[in-house]
Amino acid sequence: MSRAQGSGPLVIAVDCSTTAAKALVVNARGSVVGTGAQQLRTFSPGPHRFEQHAPDWWAATDRAVRTALSTTPDRSRVTAVCVTHQRESFVCLDGEGRPLRPAILWMDGRAEAQAQRVGTQRVEQLSGKPADITPGLYKLAWLGEHEPATLAAARRVVDVHGYLVHAMTGRWVSSTSSVDPLALLEVSTGEYSEELLAVAGLTREQLPELVPSGTLLGPLRPDVAAGWGLGAGVEVVAGLGDGQAAGLGLDVTDPTSAYLVMGTAVVIGSESTGYRPSRAYRSMISAFPGHVTVETFNAAGTYLPTWFRREFGRPELHGSPDPELEEQAAAVAPGSDRLVTLPYWNAAQTPHWDGRASGLTVGWRGSHTRAHFYRSLLEGIAFELRLQLEGLEQARGEDVKVIRAMGGGARSALWTQILADVFARPIQVGASGEASALGAAAVALTAIGSYDSLRAATHALARIDDTVKPGANTSRYADLLAVYRRLYAETRGVMHALHELTPPTERGTEEATHDEIRGRA
């Protein structure tokens, strides 16, 4: 039975994502009483490389929390803080906790060769992660080959959660759900795998202590609590990665429902009982004991329409959403007048895991316009997601009946309608754009006893804003989907041949300067 009635305690939920650190102050009913955000800078020291300065993770988190608390009526009610975060990113630290080099991010693509060479079937089975450039395992193997002194000198190698928890508590500890995306844990046991550590070139002593999500890690350090204007005894609760947390924030707690995170990358995720490895998804340790969170992954989420608007849209918008362009694309007939796009601008992920794949648009004619191309991009991502969901359902042996969406892309009426038509099933849109932070809040509220179970907390906190139903275009998209299914297989060889023709400037690895990139979720 829930004890969430009344004013109750407040918890701080931190979401340290790729683009910003965000903080919500949430009460036991799920109402947000304070918010704050601080942008993070991402640097590209060379082609396909993306890094951040780890101290910025804490500086941005600290600023976001202070802002959120500045509008909170009664800070004395704050009882706990919980972190969710960008996954797969990590930093190497010396004995004093200082970075030896910039942190390497999840979207960094430098380790393609390592993924191909050491991403064996055995590695995939142990880690639950198909060989791809995303898991930290392969970037650590890259460091072992290209920067061996860094790994040798690293006293600690930590994920974003572990870094922030240390800043808050002084402990080098992280949750299994947070570290697992690095692909260093054996999913079936939830423990570090000696075989995977050997591939990464690490020892167990270099890594944080592991605890389950929801574990009480101890109080905030006195200096942190004082800086935030909080009293003693505010508990830090072990959190989880932003994908798993988004599922909690959308009340996705069993195999019959799925979350659709439409951010810079797009993720479809669902809960499964037991571990069944497959290349149709990647398996993550869930916040629910005995569960595995299975996810498909597509790196061309809102990144792709943002890229289009930046390169071909109104310059003054700098890639931001453009209502005029959306209106023009909405006026284009479904199917974009037979213009079909394979959205592999950032390679192909589930289920191909092909770092040599690239974007492709077929069917061009002189009658096509900028609006046709834009709509084709949105449709192409929807087609890709439909195939990924089919693969997930088939490999797992259980169908998804409810899809709940969140993220910047879910705010586009055009895109959500395309998705509903392509999926041929309703799309429920979450009321909050911060589902990951709400998921972290649910973990914190359960840990301090405001709810008897995590499932009860997620059900109480989740809010649905709208339901988009399939329309009259479902059959038209079914015909186009039949064509789309053939595109990758029939063009794979051509894409690989093009990849091998990469200009010499793209092969360089020692760029001396850092160019800031502007990622928008």
Image: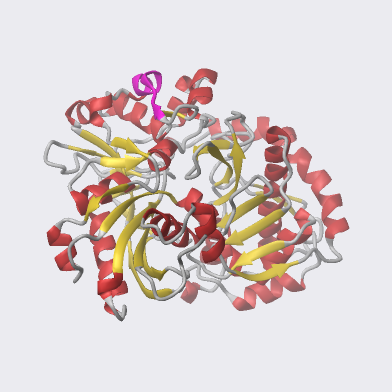
Q: Is residue 139 left or right of residue 432?
A: left
Where 56 sits versus 209, above or below?
A: below
> 88 or 180: which is nearer to us?
180
Q: Quadrant of residue 470?
A: bottom right
Residue 76, x across and y down, in percent: 25, 73
* Magenta span: 191-199
Where 288 sits versus 130, above or below?
A: below
Q: Is residue 182 left or right of residue 268?
A: left
Residue 92, x across and y down, in percent: 24, 37
Residue 171 visible (yes or no): yes
Q: Is residue 257 left or right of residue 82?
A: right
Residue visible at 37% across and 45% down in the picture? 105
Residue visible at 36% across and 19% down in the picture? 194
Residue 70, x across and y down, in percent: 27, 78
Residue 22, x across and y down, in percent: 37, 64
The number of numbered badges drawn on the structure is: 0
Which of the colour schemes (rainbow, by chain, secondary structure, one colour) is used?
secondary structure
Give the dominant element type of the magenta stretch: helix, strand or loop: helix
> 84 or 137: which is nearer to us?
84
Q: Verify whether residue 196 appears in magenta.
A: yes
Residue visible at 47% across and 76% down in the picture? 316
Q: Is residue 62 left or right of residue 424?
A: left
Residue visible at 38% across and 53% down in the picture? 447
Residue 64 visible (yes or no): no
Find the residue positioned furthest to the front. Answer: 1
Q: Verify whether residue 119 appears in magenta.
A: no
> 328 or 182: which is nearer to us?
182
Where 427 sits versus 132, above or below?
A: below
